[in-house]
Image (cartoon, coloured by chain):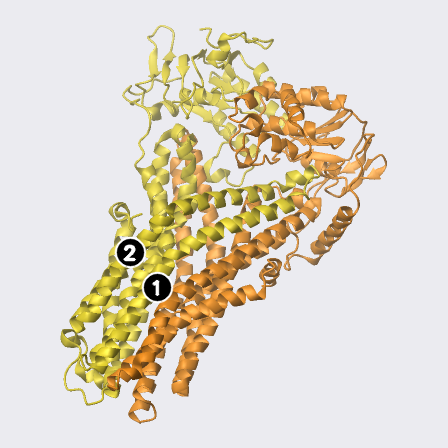
């Protein structure tokens, strides 16, 4: 619960913004209740055949409510959406900043693209909590109070009955919906993932299954996944249906009680005719506001799960172990200190990278078990030289690279730059890294190079692109260097993407660059580009560490270490 | 957009049943609402009438609830029954809606996936095919709110609204006129507002989309920025983009919510007018209290379903768009003019495969890959296809196992002393099943179905290769078999490939790994025809046969 609360605090939402939206919402739905009450009074009064002037005021009020409902509803929707959007913008910025400031382990560990892709939706879901859960709940409360007050003016007993039914209509369906949401999120989510996997398998590998005559097996898998998704939805639909039925029953009960009490009181002469009409007919309009409670409840749950994911990602979750929180806090403090200090002066003399008896591996954490550390490695990388690390899949090459970058604590041994340990402040600045899944931004080719260094000129870019053999490719683009690439580099081929990342390596100012698996998707010409990059780096006196499982890429490396040995 | 897609009822069994049940439940609901309104009028009128009620104020419809319900005990008992029945119908409707919605989604999903699988690898790989996954997973989920929320309201709008209007007409024609005049204004005004704002909303939507994508892009690229030491700057940019996004969204919402306001304004105002008009006519004695009460309670019920349809309109739009996308895939026909009229494929054991002038257009149709590829693959040999990315090695392999039709060129199976047997050309192919069942094809990134779900890519690759080697199929067609493998596994795989060839299999491999190329008996360069005519360096690698040289 506290995750969502904290996240909403992070939206910087102001109290008056919520009050504004709740007031407008109360006016809107209150108009409906008012319309029902005053119209009932008007008709009942008119039946006593007074002079028309006696009902003139009521007639004006009824017309006013006829107009005010639509107007205030419009204002309420604008106010609540504005509040939520402002909140999401602030939340996005804060989440970004706290992600950026969290330890490099947290950030560089965020390799699974889907989690990051989900972040946007999750942040929006937290904003939706304001529009669809918090504001409607408050409006339900105020409008219900208003309806009870109107009825209470004429009959306290009827008001008590109405209040009881309203509470039943809000609470029981609310709890049932909460149950349904939990089932949908847990069982339904798992079923959905299986459906996705089966769909992918059936479609993308249709030809393979055709050739190997396994189409039946995948088809059965999809049918089984579908059945499980149906069963999950069915399980969630049970409580939802009871919620809807109970709401209908509670509002019906309120009507029956109100009619009974109103007529009895009127017959006994304790209540005027118009009073009885108001008591009996107001409940017809009073339940619209609490009708929004189940939707609010399921939104609340969606937002809560979203908040938990977001805060777990930024290492702020209340549910995460205190140990992680402590680590993250420390690293964040460290990062803040770095920000406060003046920007580090450019490194004029490239440092010597000294790795001694280094064993790299992931320690056990809530994300997974500890990995088996690599064998100890000792090596000295002089400025302007290159080191190749090879090894079979899963031996820990990438982990080793992250450790050299200073993003992971070594399991044993040390990594130093001119004698000083690598760490949070050297990651990216002295020791830059290009991961296998490094991001190509949805901006121009030039800006994609400026990601590495803000002052890359057109000439710098042209030169770097020429070195990696992309001159012809850029010339063929509709706007040359200014052509906007699809987000995630979707519109460029695997080989071109690799080479663009190599060009980015060339313009990166850091004196040491670590490159993870540069050979995937590279054809012969791409491999030549990689060699050209290594030669250029050597000329500039910059060091390179390459990790790969492809030994043929390492013919230009000054030293090669096999992690399998 | 139409509120309802007739294809849903026509082609999806569960949808048909659901629509019929929902319509029936809608009719029952309409009768219950009517009974409730009439009962309220019966119960309240004796208390409110200045003089004892002499006549039945409910006219023809009054037969539904006898005059005896004016007595409190009888009336309340009836009311309790109606209220209980309404709750039961609501429960039933909700219960059925979820179940039916999910069944419909499953049904469409299965149909689409089965159909897409028959459209062939070319289509699946093309732009349209790539969207199938999105359509059948996330897209179809949008149908759930359509079935659970929108459709029942649509049915109520089709049953409750007309019934109530008729009842009001029978009770009091003047109120009926007010309702009948305002009711059509609701769709008219909504359409007008929609038309006036369509262009602006489209523009806003586009810019909102762009801004959202760019923000997410920055977040997604955060690990990359951190690894380059450049993670701090973009926070301000995230804020900037976010503020622009909010401004764009709000100006689009200011317009989008207008139609909602018109809807609420018209419906509430009409109810208010009916009430006020009746008030003054009651004072003048033109209308009885029992009639007036019934109309007062019924008037909002006429509008309620219409209002709800409007509220859930967006759910409908998203759901119908998803259904539309699904149906357009179902109506898709496999491309190409090739027919499987070439008869049963001959046994490929001991026969040489002759590929001549093979050309296949790329999915975008802008070039050929491969273009004019010719080579032969003999039993007992390993033939390697080599070439740059995108020259059509994988496509050539797929054509060789009968998965793709050549756009030009031929594939023959030959044996010494017999006429070449045509396997495929641009118009005719042998029965695909009898052909590809003889080919051990291992694509890039093999899937293996349910068995492969828990394996890593490298493990799946090994498992798929083992299946091919163990299959005893006469032709092995392997696409980058050594990718994603470490050096030890790679050597093992190459050895297995050699062994398979020694035991008589025809092996064709696409690769650009040097060790694999070294192990080949024949190396074929898959080249772009245009580049081939230039002075392309046929370099030092083993080159028994060259592309286009046959």
Left or right: where does residue B438 sit relative to residue A522?
A: left
* Depth check, front residue: B329 or B398: B329
Query: Which residue lies under the disc numbered 1?
Result: B265
Q: Which mark is residue B187?
A: 2
Quadrant assignment, res B225: top right
Chain rendered yellow: B
Inspect this view and state whether residue B475 appears.
Answer: no
Q: With A520 as the anchor, is B87 left or right in this view?
A: left
Residue farthest toward the right in the current orientation of the protein:
A419
> Percent from the top left, x then y, of residue B422?
33, 14
Question: Given contact means CB atoms under 8 Å apart, are the residues at marks 2 and 1 in contact?
Answer: no
Which residue is more in the foreground, A57 or B395? A57
Q: Nearer the viewer, mark 2 or mark 1?
A: 1
**Chain coloured orange in the rendered structure:** A
Q: Residues within 10 Å of mark 2 (few under 14, many from 20)?
A: some
Q: Secondary structure at mark 1?
A: helix
Q: Secondary structure at mark 2?
A: helix
Q: Is A537 on the left or on the right of A225, as rendered?
A: right
Give the camera-side residue of B182 and B313: B182
């Amino acid at each position: 619960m506290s995750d969502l609360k904290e996240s909403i605090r992070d939206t910087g939402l102001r109290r008056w913004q919520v009050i504004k939206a709740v007031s407008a919402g109360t006016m809107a739905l209150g108009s409906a209740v008012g319309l029902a009450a005053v119209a009932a009074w008007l008709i009942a009064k008119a039946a006593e055949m007074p002079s028309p002037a006696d009902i003139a005021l009521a007639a004006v009020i009824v017309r006013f409510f006829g107009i005010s409902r639509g107007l205030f509803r419009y204002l309420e929707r604008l106010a609540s959406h504005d509040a939520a959007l402002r909140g999401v913008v602030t939340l996005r910025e804060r989440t970004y900043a706290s992600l950026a400031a969290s330890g490099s382990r947290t950030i560089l560990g965020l390799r699974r693209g889907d989690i990051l892709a989900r972040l946007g939706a999750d942040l929006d879901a937290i904003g939706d909590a304001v529009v669809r859960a918090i504001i409607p709940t408050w409006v339900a409360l105020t409008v219900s109070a208003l309806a009870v007050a109107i009825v209470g003016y004429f009959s306290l007993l009827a008001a008590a009955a109405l209040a009881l039914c309203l509470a039943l209509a809000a609470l029981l369906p609310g709890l049932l919906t909460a149950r349904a949401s939990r089932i949908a999120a847990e069982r339904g989510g798992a079923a959905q993932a299986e459906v996705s996997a089966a769909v992918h398998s059936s479609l993308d590998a249709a030809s393979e299954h055709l050739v190997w005559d396994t189409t039946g097996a995948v088809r059965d898998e999809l049918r089984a996944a579908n059945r499980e998704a149906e069963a999950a939805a069915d399980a969630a639909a049970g409580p939802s249906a009871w919620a809807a039925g109970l709401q209908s029953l509670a509002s019906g009960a309120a009507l029956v009680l109100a009619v009974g009490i109103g007529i009895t009181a009127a017959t006994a002469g304790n209540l005027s005719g118009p009073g009885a009409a108001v008591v009996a007919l107001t409940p017809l309009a009073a339940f619209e506001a609490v009708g929004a409670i189940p939707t609010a409840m399921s939104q609340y749950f969606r937002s809560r799960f979203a908040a938990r994911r977001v805060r777990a990602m930024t290492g702020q979750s209340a549910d995460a172990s205190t140990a992680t929180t402590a680590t993250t806090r420390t690293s964040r403090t460290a990062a803040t200190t770095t920000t406060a200090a003046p920007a580090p002066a450019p490194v004029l003399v490239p440092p010597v990278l000294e790795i001694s008896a280094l064993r790299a591996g992931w320690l056990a954490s809530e994300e997974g078990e500890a990995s088996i550390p690599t064998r100890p490695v000792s090596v000295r990388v002089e400025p302007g030289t290159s080191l190749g690390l090879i090894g079979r899949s899963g031996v820990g090459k990438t982990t080793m690279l992250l450790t050299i970058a200073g993003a992971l604590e070594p399991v044993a041994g040390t990594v130093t730059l001119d004698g000083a340990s690598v760490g949070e402040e050297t990651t990216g600045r002295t020791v830059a890294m290009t991961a296998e899944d490094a991001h190509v931004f949805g901006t121009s080719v030039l800006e994609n190079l400026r990601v590495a260094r803000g002052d890359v000129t057109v000439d710098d870019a042209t030169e770097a692109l020429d070195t990696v053999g992309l001159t012809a490719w850029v010339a063929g683009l509709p706007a040359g260097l200014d052509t906007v690439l699809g987000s995630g580099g979707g519109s460029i081929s695997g080989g071109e993407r690799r080479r663009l990342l190599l060009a980015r390596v060339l313009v990166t100012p850091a004196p040491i660059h670590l490159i993870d698996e540069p050979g995937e998707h590279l054809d012969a010409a791409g491999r030549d580009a990689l060699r050209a990059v290594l030669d250029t780096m050597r000329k500039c006196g910059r060091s390179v560490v390459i990790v790969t499982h492809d030994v043929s890429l390492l013919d230009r490396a000054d030293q090669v270490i096999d992690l399998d040995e | 957009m139409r509120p309802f897609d007739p294809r849903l009822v026509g082609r999806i069994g569960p949808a048909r049943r659901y629509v019929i049940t929902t319509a029936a439940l809608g009719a029952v609901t309409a009768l219950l609402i009517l009974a409730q309104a009439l009962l309220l009028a019966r119960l309240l009128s004796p208390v409110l009438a200045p003089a004892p009620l002499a006549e039945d104020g409910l006219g023809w419809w009054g037969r539904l609830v006898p005059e005896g319900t004016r007595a409190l005990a009888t009336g309340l008992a009836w009311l309790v029954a109606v209220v209980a029945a309404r709750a039961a119908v609501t429960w039933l409707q909700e219960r059925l809606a979820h179940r039916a919605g999910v069944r419909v989604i499953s049904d469409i999903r299965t149909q689409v996936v089965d159909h897409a699988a028959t459209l062939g690898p070319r289509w699946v790989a093309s732009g349209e095919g790539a969207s199938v996954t999105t359509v059948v997973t996330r897209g179809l989920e949008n149908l759930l709110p359509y079935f659970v929320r929108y459709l029942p309201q649509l049915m109520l709008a089709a049953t409750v609204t007309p019934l109530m209007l008729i009842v009001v007409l029978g009770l009091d024609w003047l109120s009926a006129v007010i309702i009948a005049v305002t009711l059509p204004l609701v769709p008219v005004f909504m359409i007008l507002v929609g038309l006036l704002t369509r262009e602006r909303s489209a523009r806003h939507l586009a810019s909102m989309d762009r801004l959202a994508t760019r923000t997410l892009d920055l977040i997604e690229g955060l690990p990359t920025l951190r690894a380059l030491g450049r993670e701090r700057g973009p926070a301000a940019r995230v804020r900037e983009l976010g503020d622009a996004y909010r401004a764009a969204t709000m100006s689009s919402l200011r317009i989008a919510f207008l139609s909602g306001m018109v809807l609420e304004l018209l419906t509430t105002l009409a109810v208010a007018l009916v009430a006020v008009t009746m008030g003054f006519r009651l004072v003048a004695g033109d209308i009885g209290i029992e009639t007036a009460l019934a109309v007062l309670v019924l008037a909002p019920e006429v509008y309620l379903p219409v209002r709800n349809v409007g509220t859930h309109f967006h759910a409908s739009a998203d759901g119908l768009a998803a259904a539309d996308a699904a149906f357009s895939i179902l109506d898709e026909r496999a491309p190409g003019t090739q027919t499987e009229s070439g008869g049963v494929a001959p046994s490929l054991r001991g026969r040489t495969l002759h590929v001549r002038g093979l050309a296949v257009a790329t999915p975008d149709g802008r070039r050929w890959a491969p273009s004019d590829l010719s080579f032969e693959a003999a039993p007992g040999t390993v033939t390697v296809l080599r070439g740059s990315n995108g020259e059509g090695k994988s496509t050539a392999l797929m054509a060789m196992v009968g998965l793709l039709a050549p756009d030009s060129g031929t594939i023959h199976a030959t044996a010494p002393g017999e006429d070449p047997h045509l396997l495929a050309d641009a118009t005719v192919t042998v029965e695909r099943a009898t052909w590809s069942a003889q080919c051990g094809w291992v694509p890039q990134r093999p899937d293996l179905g349910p068995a492969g779900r828990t394996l890593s890519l490298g493990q799946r690759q090994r498992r798929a290769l083992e299946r091919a080697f163990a299959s005893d199929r006469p032709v092995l067609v392997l696409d980058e078999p050594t990718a994603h493998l470490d050096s030890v596994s790679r050597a093992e795989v190459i050895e297995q490939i050699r062994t398979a060839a020694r035991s008589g299999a025809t092996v064709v491999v696409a690769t650009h790994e040097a060790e694999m190329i070294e192990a080949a008996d024949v190396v074929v360069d898959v080249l772009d025809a245009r580049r081939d005519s230039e002075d392309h360096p046929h370099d030092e690698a083993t080159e028994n046969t060259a592309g286009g040289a046959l």
